[in-house]
């Protein structure tokens, strides 16, 4: 069952989404060579908790220990912040964060360049973000989940990049992960039909090389098998009759 949110629930998710957006904006101002991912996590948690009633969604979710997922370079998602992981000039760091307000969640991610990055790396970021917006444009009432994945896939693969298959977007609301699963590939008009009031986290994970993945021995961090760079952009949106409304912007 894919839940349909009430206007009041959507308003609450938009409040959570605003904090998510502001947290990622703060991360963007902080990211620089020499900073550790633990530093980012500490700042993010303090910022989120400075809003009355707001809590980090990830902390304790499936026993994840931190507020952020911070994934550097060939790490795709679910990197665990650590004082040992220091950012270096020319790297990229994907920052993923969720916030809960009054029992409702919002979820967003962005990949941030550390200092100056090579042109092909910047292109990976640009194409991944563009693929997210193509997916969002397809998330309208009457379309299907397959339309979203197909739109993401066309942009990413059209640019010569890989689309990660094992990890997907998701419905979101009172639970952080709800139905439906939203792959970043697919066939138009296939999968569950989208209806007004559905809230979805759309999140392309795109690689410069092969999209094949493996999970590190920390049991969390997912990396590319070939060591190629990966980017991750995500927004939480609500389906309407027209353009989806982005709740994390
Ligand atoms: Mg996320
Ligand atoms: Mg998500």
Image (tube, rainbow, N blue to C red):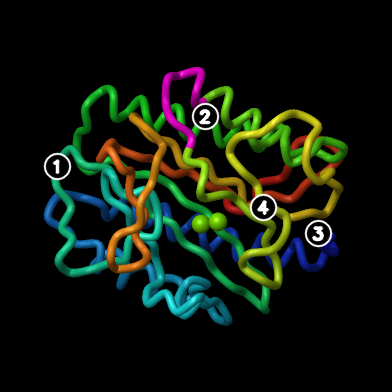
Q: Secondary structure at mark 1?
A: loop
* 137 sits to left or right of 192: left
Sequence-wise, the earlier of marks 1 and 4 is 1
Q: CA distance from mark 1 to mark 4?
A: 35 Å
In this figure, which residue is indicated by the disc labeled 1? 89
Residue at numbered disc 3: 2
- On residue 130, the disc is 2
Q: Quadrant of the N terminus?
A: bottom right
* Residue 46 seen in the figure: no
Q: Secondary structure at mark 4?
A: strand
Q: Is any part of residue 70 visible from this angle?
A: yes
Q: Residue at x 35, y 40 (%)?
A: 230
Q: Which residues are magenta?
A: 156-163
Up the image or down, 3 lies above or below 115; here it is: below
* Image-based side of 237 in relation to 49, left or right: right
**Disc 3 beta carbon < 8 A from ligand 2?**
no
Q: Which badge, 3 or 4, comes first in the chain's sequence?
A: 3
Residue sitting nearer the eye, 249 or 134: 134
Q: Secondary structure at mark 2?
A: helix
> Which disc, if any, is residue 223?
none
Give the structural element (helix, strand or loop) at label 3: loop
Q: Nearer the viewer, residue 149 or 42?
A: 149
- Please report whichever mark, 2 or 1, sits nearer to the chain's N-terminal start: 1
Q: Is residue 154 left or right of residue 127?
A: right
Label 1 crowd bin: few (<14), some (14–19), many (20+), radius 10 Å: few
Q: Is residue 87 above or below residue 50?
A: above
């Amino acid at each position: 069952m894919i839940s349909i949110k009430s206007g009041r629930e959507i308003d609450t998710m938009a409040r959570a989404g605003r904090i998510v957006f502001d947290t990622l904006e703060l991360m963007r101002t902080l990211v620089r060579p020499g900073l550790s991912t633990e530093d980012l996590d500490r700042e993010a948690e303090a910022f989120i908790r400075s809003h009355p009633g707001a809590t980090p969604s990830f902390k304790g979710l499936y026993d994840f220990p931190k507020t952020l997922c911070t994934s550097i370079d060939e790490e795709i998602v679910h990197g665990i912040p650590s004082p040992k992981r220091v950012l270096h000039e020319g790297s990229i760091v994907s920052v993923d964060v969720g916030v809960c307000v009054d029992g409702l969640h919002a979820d967003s991610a962005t990949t941030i360049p550390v200092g100056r990055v090579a042109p092909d790396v910047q292109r990976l970021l640009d194409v991944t973000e563009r693929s997210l917006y193509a997916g969002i444009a397809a998330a309208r009432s009457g379309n299907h989940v397959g339309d979203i994945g197909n739109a993401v896939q066309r942009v990413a693969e059209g640019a010569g990049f890989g689309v990660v298959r094992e990890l997907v977007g998701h419905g979101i609301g009172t639970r952080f992960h709800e139905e439906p699963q939203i792959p970043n590939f697919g066939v138009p008009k296939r999968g569950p039909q989208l209806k007004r009031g559905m809230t979805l986290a759309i999140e392309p994970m795109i690689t410069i090389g092969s999209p094949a993945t493996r999970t590190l021995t920390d049991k969390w961090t997912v990396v590319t098998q070939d060591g190629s760079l990966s980017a991750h952009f995500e927004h939480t949106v609500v389906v309407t009759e027209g353009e989806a409304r982005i709740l994390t912007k």
